Image (cartoon, rainbow, N blue to C red):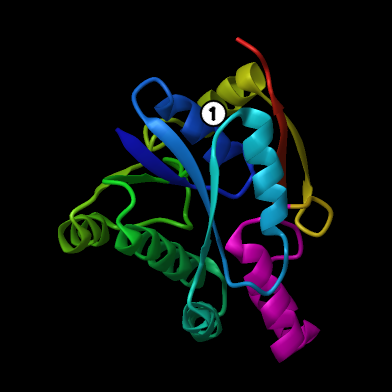
Amino acid sequence: MKVQVLYSGGKDSSLAAILLEPFFDVELVTCTFGLENTWENAKEAAHEIGFPFKLVRLDPAILDEGIDEMLKFGYPRHGISLVHRRALETVAVLGEAKHIADGTRRDDRAPKLSMGEIRSLEDRHDIRYIRPLAGYGRHAIEDLIAEHLEIIEGDTSAVPKADYETEIRSSMKTRLGVETYDRIFPPEHTQSRVLRRYSS
């Protein structure tokens, strides 16, 4: 069975793919708005951990929706969750896999789908949505990552990633200015990037 995993090149989506590997043919899917070439970071990380890679273009209207949500609430959580939900829907509409997964964790505040949103996604698109990390707490995830992956971590501005949040941040800063950006996004945000997978 094939599963497509939304992929950022970071530790969580990489670990999700590894956990799914015994049961599925895993393909890593990076979604982009086409504003930057950050997706190349995910492609490189996918190669390093040994999974096939696919690039999917998101409708620019989704970016606008996400930014509008952030401005409405004054922080990024709802906007990030909206974009994530739309990315899952975009991949589902392509119809290349019955199973679609991501690296969202048990303790995540965003992105996160409610049970109603999950059921709606599955029913409307006839897919199976999987969250391999949903049963793991932060420390258990850190233990698994230390066992399986070499990573770098640091501030968002310093670590080359490929998630759509990078494009959202860049677009907001360009269109709405640094003052608005600084008001919406917290000053410090840690990201990760996978360098390689330890051999088992």
Q: Is residue 4 above or below residue 126?
A: above
Residue 100 in view of the camera:
yes
- Verify whether residue 176 appears in magenta: yes
Q: Is residue 57 above or below residue 197?
A: below
Three-letter code for the amino acid on which mark 1 is drawn: Ile
Q: Position of residue 60 (x, y in %)?
A: 53, 81
Q: Nearer the viewer, residue 49 or 109?
A: 49
Q: Residues within 10 Å of mark 1 (few under 14, many from 20)?
A: some
- Furthest toward the right, the residue is 158
Residue pictured at 15% horizontal, 58% vertical: 123
Q: Secondary structure at mark 1?
A: helix
Residue pictured at 34% horizontal, 51% vertical: 96
Q: Position of residue 114 (x, y in %)?
A: 29, 58
Assign the magenta stretch its main secondary structure: helix
Q: Which residues are magenta?
A: 161-189
Q: Quadrant of residue 88?
A: bottom left
Q: Position of residue 92 (x, y in %)?
A: 32, 58
**Horizontal arrangement in the rendering, residue 81 relative to residue 177 (left or right):** left
**Horizontal arrangement in the rendering, residue 190 relative to residue 97 (left or right):** right
Task: Name the residue tied to disc 1.
Answer: 141
Residue 185 in view of the camera:
no
Q: Is residue 58 above or below residue 31?
A: below
Q: Position of residue 121 (x, y in %)?
A: 24, 60
Q: Quadrant of the N terminus?
A: top left
**Horizontal arrangement in the rendering, residue 157 relative to residue 11 (left or right):** right
Q: Quadrant of the C terminus?
A: top right
Q: Is residue 73 above or below residue 77?
A: below
Q: Nearer the viewer, residue 54 or 143?
A: 54
- Verify whether residue 62 appears in magenta: no
